[in-house]
Amino acid sequence: MNKSTRQRLFFLGKLALGVALLAALLVVNDNGRKVLDAFVRVQPIYLIPFFAITYPLLGASCMKWGLFLRERGVVIGFHRLFRLYLVGSFFNNFLPSMVGGDLVRAYVLGKQIESHTHSLASVFLERFTGMIALVSLATASFLFNSELRQEPVVVVSIGVMGSACLLLVAAVWNPEWALWFLRPMEKNRHVARLLPKLMQFHDHVSYFKDKPVLVGKAMLYSFTFHFLAAVNVYVACRVLAVPLDLYDAVVLTPIVLLVSSVPLSVNGLGVWEWAFGVYLAQAGVPMDQGLAVALLLRAKNLLLSLVGGVLFLFERAAVPTPAEAEGPAR
């Protein structure tokens, strides 16, 4: 069995797992019918803020992305970054977890600025600082909520993601750690060929360890994003007349996002819905209503990703204006 076949089978396996989990959630306790009933109760007045919050929500990440680019002399217009963010979200539907979409937006931007190392480092730092903020908020929710401390999935998710963040911080801070990790793989010809580029990438990333003010701004954008993500969940609940107050949304949303970020299925299919159904129950929201909220948010994300797919079709024909892209500093 060749590598391409294995990859396709792995993708189909993850897709099947997600579909099976979602189907099981909808079948148990007649949740499917209850979810349909929830959508009948849609409150149209909340649809405008539900869609409007998307702009500042994604905008916070794009502003942070632009920070890392400008620090290295690359000036890209905000709306160009916003469009690329949507393009990345489109590929998240098909490629592994969020990483696939990130690689696509890094590749497209790298072609524009003629430096894939710059673009990949900026995307990595934008995502990495967001993950640190997410783990921090989820850990705080975990420590101050006795019921969450009894949830093994939350314990494992925080442990795994927290450990990964600490290892990445250590690798960024100390180049020897990165070399220690890469040296055992040097015998692999593919790794050996990529090693110089990997070390160049590491140099671009570690450059920011001596920029505490800039990193502080990036973390502020990250916490802003996660607060707006909680508001996004709260407004989605208002759309479906689900009784969840803003405080509970702020406490529980980081847990839901952290658990659903574990790459068990394609684009978190089934896992996303399960996490909402289980953890919104901590605030007294019935499972079927939590599922309805998750499906409403997924529908919006899917719509945005389709916009990203359309934008990607125009990428080859798009010629950035000087105002949009000044390119990397030489």
Image (cartoon, rainbow, N blue to C red):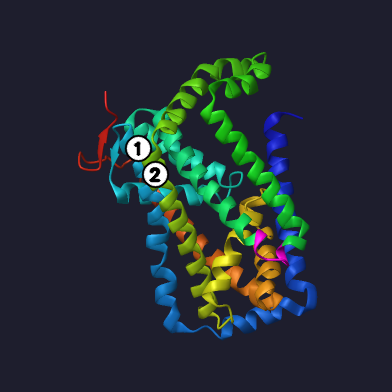
Quarter that holds the N terminus: top right
Mark sitting on residue 69 = 1
Residue 239, horizontal then vertical, whole percent: 51, 79
Tell me: 311 left or right of 73: right
- Is residue 147 a member of the stretch shown in magenta? yes
Q: Nearer the viewer, residue 216 or 319?
A: 216
Q: Residue furthest front?
A: 144
Where disc 1 sits, the SS reads helix
Mark sitting on residue 151 = none
Where disc 2 sits, the SS reads helix
Please indicate, yes or no, whether residue 315 appears anywhere in the rendered image.
Answer: no
Circle 2 residue: 65
Magenta range is 143-148
Residue 27, horizontal then vertical, whole percent: 77, 73
The amino acid at mark 1 is Leu
Residue drawn 67% across and 51% down?
A: 158
C-alpha separation, residue under disc 2 versus residue under disc 1: 7 Å
Cβ atoms under marks 2 and 1 closer than 8 Å: yes
The amino acid at mark 2 is Trp
Residue drawn 37% across and 51% down?
A: 82
Q: Quadrant of residue 163?
A: top right
Q: In which quarter of the image is residue 106?
A: top left
Tell me: 86 left or right of 288: left
Q: Which residue lies furthest to the left in this view?
A: 322
Residue drawn 55% across and 49% down?
A: 92
- Kindly report the secondary structure that dominates the magenta region of the rendered protein: loop
